[in-house]
Image (cartoon, rainbow, N blue to C red):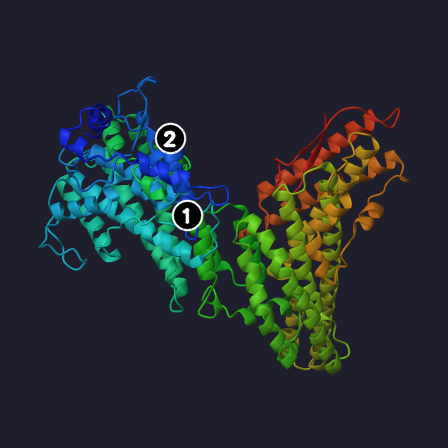
């Protein structure tokens, strides 16, 4: 066994045969001569033209014992039940990759496998799959299962199917071996197939970060004598074999085997279907996947207690087999001699909870959005919720792959048509506006930047901010100028036309700027109390600008609706002699005046922006009050300044023509409350938070009449914002009492952002 080899390797070094001693050559003199040839100007004992970083890291093998041959502590590879004390623990080379089931180092369990062992191996495979989806490389996740190595899979296939059998998915093969053996073989095959499918999806989407996904396979040899059809057929045959062979089907191990194999089949089917959608029958395919996801979710939630019961009663024999079958260090030589990050696997509870969330996200974050997202505003709001829900990289990748294909959003809606519909609905414009050649060309020009807005919401939060500031703000600066030209052309045709396209482009641009500052707060880029106050002050400015533009749009919309209603009423009066026609036109006029469902959603979003502005404004005034009270110490920088920090934080906004970019002098003037009475300042800040709490209450009442998928905040988020509003009001009252006598007070200040990632509670301690 491998343990015996580890124990005996050092002892046998002193007992080499005489033939081996004769073959050994002393090369000390050669190394000495080479070392003597080195000089200060030429210190390299190698070809300097080809020497690189990899060579430098490899050289550490001779220099650092901890990096020598990727060695690991002996205690980490000891068999189950064998303890290695500190005195006997030493570094050993990891076991080599298995060459088959009857491996010479340590034969893998096969003939002795039981159904209970197979169930525990299946659970452990799920943990390895979760590790892959959590960002580990294939050699640190999938291929830590020794059954997944190419020679072992080939050996299992040869034993269970035989060289003459046909398992291409067309003919039903004759099952050989025990049920436990077939379960291990089937679970290994589908683990490999899922690994390849997941990697293909993530690589094609190409939005992953280093912590999300590891690209390199480290030249791992993969068992390729399979395809999706043969794998599915093998798993299906194993499930049928289990039904025919087992009399007692109510045991926990049988339930776990059946449900986990079926879940893996469903996960493979859902992933491949969503990755291969085309323009034909998109909705039918998505509906099928959604139904499968809901059924899988129910089965998985029902299975979790069974798995927990099975794991809690795991016998020592099963623990010993798991220790033999799964080796975290077996592939370390492939990774290299450099220190490898510690490989950590989740508990079975956390792994199953992960797959429950993954399956739920497949339903609501992917399928539901593709089925219900029929307008730009709705898609944007749904993507915003997905963005803050921390969906897995697999879900994010599937969203990106399906966001735009066959020249359509979700393969269903032409993007220029969605943009036209969005502008038309926001202003309540007639179709004739969009027949203008300049308007048509501008909408086509806007398609790519608008797609970027949707796509950026799928990215990780830190990449969102970087992409907005580096690319998107520049694009929308150009679009604003082009929109002004389009509006000028429309005004020549219709002198009464408002700058519709300019207003639309401005609202998008300001939204991106505000989102960038909000992400900075969420990512803790604003560190000190001063920087946090600056961030909320700038957000107050941006949200006020956005609310102003949206108010103009809403006024134009109401004016157009009123004009349309007047025209319908005038037409009704002209046709008063026609009783039936008059009633019909009156009905049309009344219908035009009523708000649509999307109008109600827009009203909710508008009130939410006012809430955010109120919280920002209240926070700025609260910070000014604590400054007046002497609770914040002024920071002195040695290598930079507050002005320089301000310039770098908002440098990307300098390209925007509107709203005008602000300077640090603007901040100093806008946040200077030194001439304001302290009590008035405290009262003003308190009123901001009280008004915010009232807006939260109003939003909560409005949410009941809106589909929760079409609002960019959840009921839980609203409760947290209410908590922040109330908390800041209480601490303002406390500060008012503390400064009542002298205007100054002693104590500490704590900026608490646990309730919300974008808004804080200022605690006086």
Mark number, residue 214? 1
Q: Residues within 10 Å of mark 2 (few under 14, many from 20)?
A: few
Residue placed most toward the observer, 608 or 344: 344
Give x and y (percent) for residue 500.
70, 70
Asked if residue 363 shows in the view, the reply is no
Q: Nearer the viewer, residue 1 or 333?
A: 333
Q: Is residue 367 left or right of residue 441?
A: left
Q: According to the image, label 2 marks what residue?
A: 65
Checking the image for residue 193, the label placed there is none
Image position, residue 214 (x, y; %): 41, 48
Which residue is depicted at the point 62% across and 47% down?
A: 519
Question: Looking at the image, is 79 positioned above or below residue 753?
Answer: above
Using residue 482 as the reference point, say whether residue 258 is left or right of it: left
Badge 1: residue crowd in 10 Å (few <14, some 14–19, many ≥20): some
Q: Where does residue 736 sit, x and y in percent of width and height?
A: 82, 29
The answer to whether 141 is drawn above or below residue 737 in the figure is: below
Quadrant into which the C terminus falls: top right
């Amino acid at each position: 066994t491998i343990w015996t080899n580890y124990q005996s390797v050092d002892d046998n070094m002193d007992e080499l045969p005489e033939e081996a001693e004769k073959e050994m050559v002393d090369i000390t003199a050669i190394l000495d001569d080479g070392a003597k040839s080195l000089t200060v100007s030429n210190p390299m004992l190698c070809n300097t033209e080809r020497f690189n970083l990899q060579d430098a890291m490899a050289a550490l093998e001779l220099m650092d014992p901890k990096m020598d041959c990727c060695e690991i502590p002996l205690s980490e590879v000891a068999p189950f039940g064998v303890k290695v004390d500190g005195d006997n623990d030493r570094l050993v080379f990891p076991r080599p990759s298995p060459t088959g089931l009857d491996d010479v180092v340590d034969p893998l369990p096969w003939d002795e496998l039981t159904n209970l062992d197979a169930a525990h191996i299946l659970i452990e495979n799920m943990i390895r799959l979760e590790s892959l989806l959590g960002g580990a490389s294939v050699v640190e996740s999938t291929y830590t299962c020794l059954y997944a190595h190419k020679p072992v899979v080939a050996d299992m296939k040869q034993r269970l199917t035989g060289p003459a059998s046909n398992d291409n998915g067309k003919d039903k093969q004759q099952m050989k071996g025990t049920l436990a053996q077939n379960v291990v073989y089937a679970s290994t095959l589908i683990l490999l197939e899922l690994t390849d499918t997941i990697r293909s999806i993530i690589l094609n989407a190409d939005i992953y970060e280093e912590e999300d996904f590891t690209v390199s396979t480290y030249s791992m040899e993969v068992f390729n004598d399979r395809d999706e059809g043969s794998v599915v057929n093998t798993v299906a045959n194993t499930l049928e074999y289990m039904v025919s062979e087992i009399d007692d089907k109510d045991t926990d191990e049988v339930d776990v085997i059946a449900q986990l194999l079926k879940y893996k089949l469903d996960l493979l089917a859902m992933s491949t279907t969503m990755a291969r959608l085309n323009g034909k029958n998109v909705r039918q395919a998505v509906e099928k996947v959604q139904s499968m996801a809901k059924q899988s979710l129910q089965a998985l939630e029902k299975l979790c207690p069974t798995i927990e019961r099975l794991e809690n009663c795991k016998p020592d024999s099963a623990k010993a087999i798991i220790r033999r079958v799964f080796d975290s260090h077996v592939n370390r030589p492939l990774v290299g001699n450099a220190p490898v990050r510690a490989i950590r696997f989740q508990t079975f509870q956390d792994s199953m909870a992960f797959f429950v969330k993954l399956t739920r996200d497949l339903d609501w974050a992917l399928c539901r959005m593709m089925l219900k997202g029929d307008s730009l505003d709705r898609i944007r709001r749904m993507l915003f919720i997905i963005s803050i829900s921390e969906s897995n990289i697999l879900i994010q990748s599937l969203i990106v792959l399906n966001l735009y294909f066959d020249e359509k959003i979700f393969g269903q809606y032409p993007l220029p048509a969605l943009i036209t519909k969005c502008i038309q609905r926001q202003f309540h414009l007639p179709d004739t506006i969009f027949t203008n050649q300049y308007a048509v060309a501008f909408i086509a020009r806007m398609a790519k930047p608008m797609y970027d807005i949707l796509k950026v919401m799928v990215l990780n939060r830190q990449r969102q901010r970087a992409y907005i500031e580096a690319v998107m703000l520049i694009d929308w600066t150009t679009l604003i100028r082009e929109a002004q030209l389009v509006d000028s052309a429309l005004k020549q045709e219709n002198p009464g036309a408002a700058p519709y396209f300019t207003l639309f482009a401005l609202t998008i641009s300001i939204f991106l700027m505000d989102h960038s500052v909000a992400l900075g707060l969420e990512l803790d880029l604003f560190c000190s109390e001063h920087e946090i106050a600056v961030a909320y002050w700038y957000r107050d400015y941006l949200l006020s600008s956005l609310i102003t533009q949206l108010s103009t749009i809403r006024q134009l919309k109401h004016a157009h609706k009123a004009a349309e209603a007047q025209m319908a009423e005038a037409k009704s009066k002209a046709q008063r002699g026609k009783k039936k026609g008059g009633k019909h036109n009156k009905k049309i006029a009344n219908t035009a005046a009523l708000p649509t469902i999307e109008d109600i959603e827009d009203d909710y979003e508008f009130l939410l922006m006012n809430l955010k502005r109120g919280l920002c404004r209240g926070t700025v005034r609260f910070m000014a009050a604590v400054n007046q009270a002497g609770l914040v110490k002024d920071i002195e920088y040695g290598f930079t300044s507050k002005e320089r920090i301000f310039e770098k934080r908002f440098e990307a906004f300098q390209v925007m023509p509107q709203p005008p970019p602000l300077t640090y002098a603007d901040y100093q003037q806008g946040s200077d409350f030194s001439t304001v009475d302290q009590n008035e300042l405290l009262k003003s800040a308190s009123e901001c938070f009280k008004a915010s709490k009232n807006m939260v209450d109003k939003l909560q009442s409005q949410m009941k009449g809106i589909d929760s998928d079409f609002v960019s905040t959840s009921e839980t988020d609203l409760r947290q914002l209410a908590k922040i509003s109330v908390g800041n009001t209480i601490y303002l009252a406390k500060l008012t009492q503390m400064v009542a006598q002298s205007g100054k007070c002693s104590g500490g200040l704590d900026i608490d952002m646990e309730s919300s990632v974008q808004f804080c509670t200022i605690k006086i301690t």
